Amino acid sequence: MTDAKGDDGRLLRVHVMRYNPQDANSTPHLETFEIREAAGMTLYVALTEIRETLDASVNFDFVCRAGICGSCGMMINGQPGLACRTLTASLPKDITLLPLPVFELISDLSVNTGKWMRGMAERLETWAHGVDKDVDVDKLEERMEPELAQEIYELERCIECGCCVAACGTAHMREDFVGAVGMNKMARFRLDPRDDRSDADLYELVGNDEGVFGCLTLLGCVDVCPKDLPLAGQIAFLRRRMLKEAL
Ligand code: SF4
Ligand code: F3S
Ligand code: FES
């Protein structure tokens, strides 16, 4: 087979973890699929081809195919990443795909990040407090300096893909750890003038081992975040604020 440029594509060997925890007869194992690489092929495209031509029962998640929805996170040769943003050309011929750890496994490469994210969001109350008590449209529309809006927007770019959690040693050891994604959200609300919570309020939520004091500065989160969020800086910022509160 030749690709669009007329070059022979590599023969890829894609090893996919197969396991359905709902099926008593299912046992975790790797299944190997061979497909011909095409120009510009992403892992999402490779998995779709596998599903369309070799085995329709392979489960994996996707929605946007553009690095926006955060659904297609998986372990790609041992590292968390987005299938739709990973070119097969950036990988060797043998590609091993496993589901993201820490999250509840649904089946094969599909995990329930939504359940984890909702639990974290409810625990940390990741919404602007104050504005919802007494909705005042004028206050909601209050002018914000563009620099501050930009700073908040920068942290808002998180797509809740879960890669930072899967890459974090602390998250592997304690299931109540809020991860870099949770701390990033807290830092985002700390910046937002519409959120009337004080540092003391935030201390109650993340001034503990489930939050900033559980982070061991392993920085795996920084290495894998597909949106290149400034996680190290935000965690350090939050830690300084919480330490001040603790003293
Ligand atoms: Fe994904 Fe980055 Fe958000 Fe973590 S912080 S969930 S890696 S986008
Ligand atoms: Fe984990 Fe990132 Fe801290 S990998 S330990 S949240 S610096
Ligand atoms: Fe939406 Fe990959 S399918 S981020």
Image: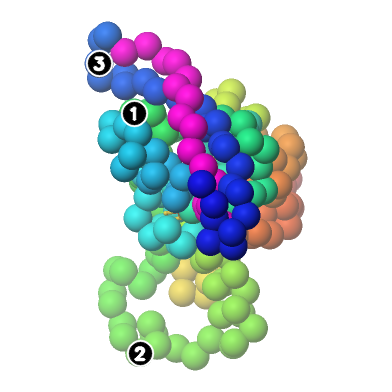
Residue 169 versus residue 37 in the image, above or below: above
Mark closest to the chain's N terminus, 2 or 3: 3
**Quadrant location of the C terminus?**
top right
Q: Position of residue 85 (x, y in %)?
A: 54, 55
Question: Which residue is situated farthest in the top direction here?
Answer: 25
Left or right side of 123 for 214: right
Residue under the point 61% across and 49% down: 8
Q: Position of residue 236 (x, y in %)?
A: 73, 52
Mark closest to the chain's N terminus, 2 or 1: 1
Q: Is mark 2 within 8 Å of ligand 1?
A: no
**Pick the front one: 160 or 151:** 160
The residue tagged 1 is 107
Residue under the point 59% across and 62% down: 5
Residue 115: numbered disc: none
Mark closest to the chain's N terminus, 3 or 1: 3
Can I make out residue 217 in this image? Answer: yes
Q: What is the crowding at mark 2: few (fewer than 14 residues within 10 Å), some, or many (at least 20)?
A: few
Any magenta on residue 34?
yes
Provide the secondary structure element on which disc 2 rests: helix
The residue tagged 3 is 23
Q: Position of residue 161 (x, y in %)?
A: 48, 49
Residue under the point 49% across and 59% down: 67
Distance from disc 3 to disc 1, alpha carbons, whole Å, reads: 10 Å
Provide the secondary structure element on which disc 1 rests: strand
Q: Which residues are magenta?
A: 26-42
**Pick the front one: 102 or 3:** 3
Residue under the point 51% across and 42% down: 36
Residue kind at label 2, given as amino acid type = Asp
Closer to the observer: label 2 or label 3? Answer: 3
Residue 138: numbered disc: 2
